[in-house]
């Protein structure tokens, strides 16, 4: 029952709303803080960073549109609503997102098989009956000629639409993963750095052990044992990914602990949890933000690698990794089919490059000393 | 020095044990031997007898931690934890789940090809990256610097998969300089190795050059560089002689840790170019869901990483006399 709810579209939509709301709340909070505002001013004058920012926002909008989904009711032939025997409405088995609804023409204008970008004819020859009755092999005209900007794939689906569907997957892997990792990293990093002693030893032991296991093998083993899927990928990338940030936060907490204002708070008798919450954690936020942005692009690229190894998100979820895997076979064809690879390249590169550029600018603005990745 | 090395190695033992326990939990507690048997045998011939026989054949029928049916020490040794977990400590990898190969033998056999690609990629890559980074650092603050960094970021933003696919296509299929994939023994292996090495180097350039550039820039800001300039040395001499020598310390720490890992090979390169190294061994095991091999590779990788950390610490003390062995 509980699990059903977590998989439902209602939960998904609520989750999106919560993310949006907390994002807005964080921005409002940050606007009240002088150092965040001045960092933003520094970024704003950089042309490259701002172009990157706009592109990232565009990706975000596409991902958001694709995350809000619901199922339509089934209608009878006369246009009336269909009900089952218990008198409940019948819904379609899978829902459609806002993106699906906005690009109906892309989703539904499918062809039979491959066609190159902006082509009027199919890519492969077929045996057809000519108007004069003779039978010949030729390239049949497409049902929707000159509408597929990036061509169609083997099943005739529009490549542009597939690439757009991959945006959400990439954003979730890049974003959700770090959201899973951040609480661990903050908790362990701050506690280890602040208390020191055996607590520090234990936590250091845990993250040294975890990080000494080759990440990719641990991830793959985990995904083989549990079912593969988008959420599982995020969880395991989060579990393996918190150690690096934890180390950074521990080192910074060690430094902060000795600063005058923390000692002053201690002298005033402020409780330890309060000191951590009000004086330590807020001063770690810039490190968290920087590592969030800088890790994002690596995570997006790791999705493709996992798909190649065969433990990716699975064929039913649109992803750029799946497109690359298909493209590998398509390049072996004669003549080759190149647009699937090109589309995935444009979309992935178009996200990763702005994120990297923006991340650099954010790092320079927030903490010029922090040069570790 | 010897005492330091011994102590450093002793520190590694709990971490190795931790890795063993963690992999054991993952592979035997989360996933029972019955699940494993089901995956290996397939749905078709999945009978209770077949599962039992498979477990007998692979020693998965033993109790997990303590065997109450045996006497003395055998109480502990006749268990899954001892046979499949602890035995990794002395590199007894056992047999693979699917076709009963000796994993240790396979690892020894496949190390060669992995090293044959790993070592040239590593050394040449390092040379290329450091040279490029020094040139960019020499022209710091100019357009060469700006565009150099931008190009690095662009190169970093391309997934490894594209480099491999594009390289394979351009060099192998269009120009026909190298065979598309495959491997051969002896001298003939060179033509198969070159392409993976070249692509391996290109893959690492973006991140590498940018990383070394920041290291050089950090060194350039230091006092001894100012002194060298004040003495009237040329900028090139300051940078390439004084700067490089001191930058070796941070470079070394990043580099030494990777050396033992060369044994592991590259998952992607080896898989794409069908090179029979340890990387492709892991990928094949993953795709065949052979957990015994995956377990062995996870352990081997962890141990090599820990060896790398120890080597890093030792090399650190060797190149930087300021660091004391305490």
Image (cartoon, coloured by chain):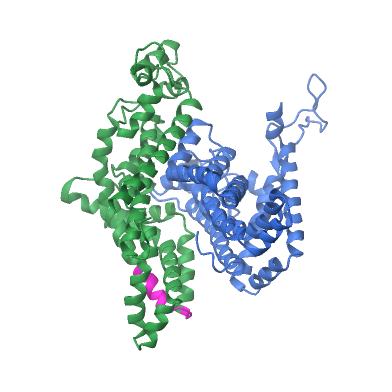
Chain colours: A blue, B green
Q: Is residue A262 visible?
A: yes
Apparent side of residue B247 relative to residue B105 in the rendered image (left or right): right
Apparent side of residue B197 relative to residue A299 in the rendered image (left or right): left
Residue A212, quarter of the rendered image: top left
Apparent side of residue B325 relative to residue A199 in the rendered image (left or right): left
Give the x, y percent position of residue B33.
Answer: 44, 21
| A208 up-or-down from B227: above or below | above
Check if residue B137 falls in the magenta segment.
Answer: yes
Taking the view exactly as shown, the residue that stands out farthest to the left is B187
Apparent side of residue B231 relative to residue B115 in the rendered image (left or right): right
Give the x, y percent position of residue A112.
Answer: 54, 42
Residue visible at 45% across and 63% down?
B155
Main SS category, magenta section: helix
Residue visible at 43% across and 76% down?
B220
| B147 up-or-down from A327: above or below | below
Q: Is residue B176 visible?
A: no
| B213 up-or-down from A70: above or below | below
| Depth order, front residue of B300/B177 | B300
| B254 up-or-down from A115: above or below | below
Give the x, y percent position of residue A152.
Answer: 54, 48
């Amino acid at each position: 029952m509980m699990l059903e709810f977590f998989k439902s579209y209602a939960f998904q939509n609520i989750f999106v709303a919560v993310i949006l709301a907390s994002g807005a709340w964080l921005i409002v909070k940050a606007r009240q803080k002088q150092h965040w505002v001045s960092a933003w001013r520094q970024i704003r004058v950089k042309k490259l960073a701002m172009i990157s920012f706009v592109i990232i926002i565009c990706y975000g909008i596409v991902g958001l549109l694709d995350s809000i989904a619901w199922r339509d009711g089934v209608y009878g032939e006369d246009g009336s609503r269909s009900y089952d025997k218990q008198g409940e409405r019948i819904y379609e088995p899978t829902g459609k997102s806002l993106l699906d609804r906005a690009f109906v023409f892309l989703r539904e204008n499918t062809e039979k098989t491959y066609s190159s970008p902006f082509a009027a004819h199919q890519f492969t020859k077929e045996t057809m009956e000519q108007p004069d009755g003779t039978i010949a092999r030729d390239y049949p005209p497409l049902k929707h000629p000159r509408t597929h900007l990036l061509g169609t794939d083997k099943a005739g689906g529009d490549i542009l639409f597939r690439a757009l569907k991959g945006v959400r997957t990439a954003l979730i892997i890049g974003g959700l993963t770090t959201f899973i990792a951040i609480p661990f990293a903050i908790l362990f990093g701050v506690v280890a750095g602040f208390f020191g002693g055996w607590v520090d030893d234990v936590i250091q032991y845990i993250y040294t052990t975890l990080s000494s296991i080759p990440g990719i093998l641990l991830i793959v083993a985990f995904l083989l044992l549990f079912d593969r899927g988008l959420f599982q990928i995020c969880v395991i990338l989060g579990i393996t990914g918190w150690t690096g940030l934890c180390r950074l936060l521990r080192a910074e907490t060690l430094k902060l602990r000795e600063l005058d204002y923390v000692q002053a708070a201690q002298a005033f008798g402020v409780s330890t949890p309060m000191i951590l919450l009000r004086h330590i954690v807020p001063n770690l936020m810039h490190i968290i933000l920087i590592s969030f942005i800088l890790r994002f692009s690596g995570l997006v690229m790791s999705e493709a690698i996992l798909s190649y190894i065969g433990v990716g998100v699975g064929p039913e979820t649109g992803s750029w990794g799946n497109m690359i895997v298909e493209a590998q076979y398509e390049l072996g064809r004669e003549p080759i089919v190149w647009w699937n690879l090109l589309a995935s390249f444009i979309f992935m590169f178009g996200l990763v490059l702005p994120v990297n550029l923006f991340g650099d600018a954010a790092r320079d603005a927030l903490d010029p000393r922090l040069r570790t990745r | 020095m010897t005492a330091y090395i011994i102590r450093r190695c002793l520190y590694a033992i709990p971490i190795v044990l931790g890795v063993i326990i963690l992999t054991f939990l993952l592979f035997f507690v989360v996933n029972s031997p019955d699940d494993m048997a089901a995956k290996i045998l397939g749905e078709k011939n999945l009978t209770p007898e077949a599962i039992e026989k498979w477990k007998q054949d692979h020693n998965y029928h033993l109790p997990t931690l303590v065997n109450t049916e045996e006497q003395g020490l055998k109480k502990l040794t006749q268990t899954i934890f001892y046979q499949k977990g602890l035995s990794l400590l002395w590199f007894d990898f056992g047999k693979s789940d699917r076709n009963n190969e000796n994993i240790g033998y396979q690892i020894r056999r496949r190390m060669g090809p992995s090293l044959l690609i790993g070592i040239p990629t590593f050394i040449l890559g390092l040379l290329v990256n450091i040279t490029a980074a020094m040139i960019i650092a020499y022209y710091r603050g100019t357009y060469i610097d700006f565009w150099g960094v931008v190009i690095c970021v662009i190169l970093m933003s391309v997934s490894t998969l594209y480099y491999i696919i594009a390289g394979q296509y351009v060099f192998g299929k269009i120009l026909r300089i190298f065979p598309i994939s495959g491997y051969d023994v002896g001298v003939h292996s060179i033509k198969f190795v070159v392409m993976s090495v070249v692509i391996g180097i290109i893959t690492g350039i973006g991140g590498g050059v940018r990383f070394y550039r920041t290291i050089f820039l950090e060194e350039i800001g230091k006092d001894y560089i100012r002194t060298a300039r004040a003495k009237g040395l040329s900028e090139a001499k300051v940078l390439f002689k004084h700067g490089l020598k001191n930058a070796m310390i941070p470079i070394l720490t990043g580099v030494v840790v990777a050396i033992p890992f060369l044994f592991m090979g590259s998952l992607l390169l080896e898989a794409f170019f069908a090179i029979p190294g340890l990387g492709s061994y892991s990928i094949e095991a993953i795709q065949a869901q052979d957990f015994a091999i995956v377990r062995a590779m996870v352990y081997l990788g962890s141990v090599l990483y820990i060896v790398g950390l120890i080597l890093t610490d030792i090399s650190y003390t060797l190149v930087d006399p300021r660091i004391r062995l305490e």
